[in-house]
Image (cartoon, rainbow, N blue to C red):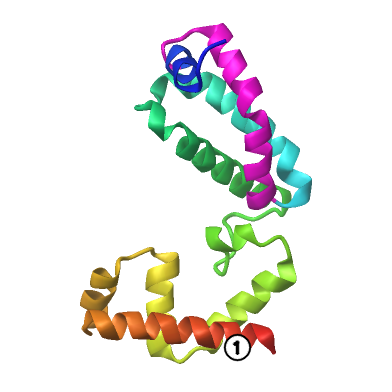
């Protein structure tokens, strides 16, 4: 039996048996990822589509270490595609963000959105830049024309306000 990295490398090089074994070994992980990213009705479809994509595109993987992250990106894209097609959407709702896909309850997602919208602008902008746009503290400080300490403070206070809002 091949070690995980050897299996990924063999699959990258076009070995069909290695690719098949890789898909078998990683299917449970894909299902766990899909469970966190998709609606419950879309999990199996997302996994099957992802497996097909991996089979076709494994040769394009740049490094072995990138494999788990690559799987997550594929699953996220397939879940988003299924959400759009199953709900007849041209694009995902404006208030949808990948961050919310980790929460399976639509009510909780709406509560989080409402909590963020309830924040004063200075805290809301810092939270959005950090948690949605994934900017560093320095980048947030530069963008908002504040110090790094002020950026950290706004993020911290904003998160506390969101927590208080959700505890109501």
Q: Residues within 10 Å of mark 1 (few under 14, many from 20)?
A: few
Q: Nearer the viewer, residue 11 or 109?
A: 11
Q: What residue is shown at x 65% (from left), y 70% (from top)?
A: 109
Q: Is residue 108 magenta?
A: no
Residue at far right of view = 41
The answer to whether 144 appears left or right of 100 in the picture is left
In the rendered view, would you say 113 is above or below 92? below
In which quadrant will I find the C terminus? bottom right
Disc 1 designates what residue? 164
Q: What residue is shown at x 62% (from left), y 58% (from top)?
A: 102
Percent position of residue 55, x then y: 55, 20
Report which quarter residue 133 is drawn in.
bottom left
The answer to whether 70 appears left or right of 167 in the picture is left
Report the span colored magenta.
12-38
Percent position of residue 50, x then y: 60, 32
Percent position of residue 64, x then y: 40, 26
């Amino acid at each position: 039996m091949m070690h995980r990295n050897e299996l990924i490398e063999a699959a990258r090089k076009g070995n069909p048996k290695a690719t098949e074994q890789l898909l078998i070994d990683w299917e449970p992980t894909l299902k766990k990822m899909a469970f966190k990213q998709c609606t419950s009705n879309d999990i199996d479809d997302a996994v099957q589509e992802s497996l097909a994509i991996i089979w076709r595109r494994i040769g394009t993987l740049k490094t072995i270490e990138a494999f788990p992250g690559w799987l997550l990106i594929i699953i996220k894209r397939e879940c988003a595609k299924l959400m759009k097609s199953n709900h007849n959407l041209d694009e995902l709702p404006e208030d949808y963000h990948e961050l919310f896909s980790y929460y399976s309850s639509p009510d909780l997602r709406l509560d989080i959105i409402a909590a963020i919208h309830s924040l004063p602008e200075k805290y809301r902008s810092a939270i959005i830049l950090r948690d949605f746009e994934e900017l560093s503290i320095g980048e947030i400080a530069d963008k908002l024309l504040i110090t790094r300490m002020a950026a950290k403070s706004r993020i911290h206070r904003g998160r506390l306000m969101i927590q208080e809002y959700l505890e109501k």
